[in-house]
Amino acid sequence: MDKKTLNQIVAEKPFHDYAAWWPMGQTFVSFMSEAILSQWSELHENDGDLGDVRAYVAIYLKTVFGRETRPALVEDFVKQSFSRPIQSGEFDALSYAFYRAAFELIERHLDVYDHPLYGNPLAEERRSFTKRVGKIFFRQVHDYLPLALPNGLHDEESFARLKECIQAVGAFLRAEGYLRDHFAFSFTLDVEHAGRRIGQREAEFLANLNQQGMAYALYEMGYPVILPSAVYLYHTLGEAQHHSSRTIEELFAWVGYEARETDDFDPTGYPADKVVELWEIRKLVP
């Protein structure tokens, strides 16, 4: 994938559907503040200076939305002081800025991390950051709702409880403005992927998972608030935030399964009203 500047990718993919902002829920923004700040502040050689973050927020809002940054936006997010509701475009900019700053800091100090002798260390560390944020965020959502997760997927009853918990998370994301439109997480699919046809009925999910070791799902999002910045981060730095995906990934981990979108997922190729991820689900190895 050729790396591009923010100006280049915004010119190619302007996301006009996101020009009209909507208010974000305070609970969601507070949880995200806690999750992002806790992991950003712990990065190697991070002295807590918000200068780069403020600059990236201002650049993003000007480039993407043609708007100036309102005073104290970054400070309000950090301190969880919401006298004015944070708007969708503002959260998109905040997410972009903190993740860009984090990804760049990781790259500057990549030598401090332990890596296997194969793979892409930079990509692994950036994804690890997104996973750590997702863990903190999910823990808060889990306690807030609260969720009655099953202990494993052994039968139809435990599967039904899993689906109820996923739908509860989806309803939370919609109510709090992370998804403007709709949420769907389906275990029935018939898709073409990587040159092969993948088909599965919901009734086959447990058998595929427990007998074959892997099953599939489709995650569909309507107007996820960070789609613009996810595309822009992906095409400038090679990794996106995946806020809701890492949340559901952690939900599966609590049940005892590894679940995530396929490695080749690129958010660019989808319309804002229907972003679709193909997921692979496997039992965690003790």
Image (cartoon, rainbow, N blue to C red):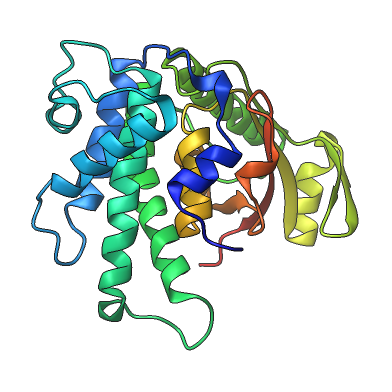
Q: Can you give x and y, in whole percent of width and height, for residue 234 in the image?
A: 51, 52
- The structure residue drawn at horizontal position 46% and vertical position 44%, both measured from the top left corner, is 7
- The structure residue drawn at horizontal position 34% and vertical position 48%, both measured from the top left corner, is 99
Using the image, determine if residue 46 lies above or below residue 81: below
Q: Is residue 8 left or right of residue 197?
A: left
Q: Can you give x and y, in whole percent of width and height, for residue 155 in the image?
A: 70, 39
Q: Can you give x and y, in whole percent of width and height, for residue 176 in the image?
A: 41, 16
- The structure residue drawn at horizontal position 73% and vertical position 60%, both measured from the top left corner, is 213
Q: Nearer the viewer, residue 208 or 30?
A: 30
Q: Nearer the viewer, residue 43 or 270?
A: 270
Q: Is residue 182 left or right of residue 201?
A: left
Q: Nearer the viewer, residue 198 or 69?
A: 69
Q: Residue furthest bottom?
A: 117
Res. 64 visible in picture? yes
Res. 251 visible in picture? no
Using the image, determine if residue 275 lies above or below residue 286: above
Q: Quadrant of residue 217?
A: top right
Q: How many marks?
A: 0
The image quadrant where one finds the N terminus is: bottom right
Q: Can you give x and y, in whole percent of width and height, for residue 138 in the image?
A: 39, 37
Q: Nearer the viewer, residue 147 or 274?
A: 274
Q: Is residue 69 left or right of residue 270?
A: left
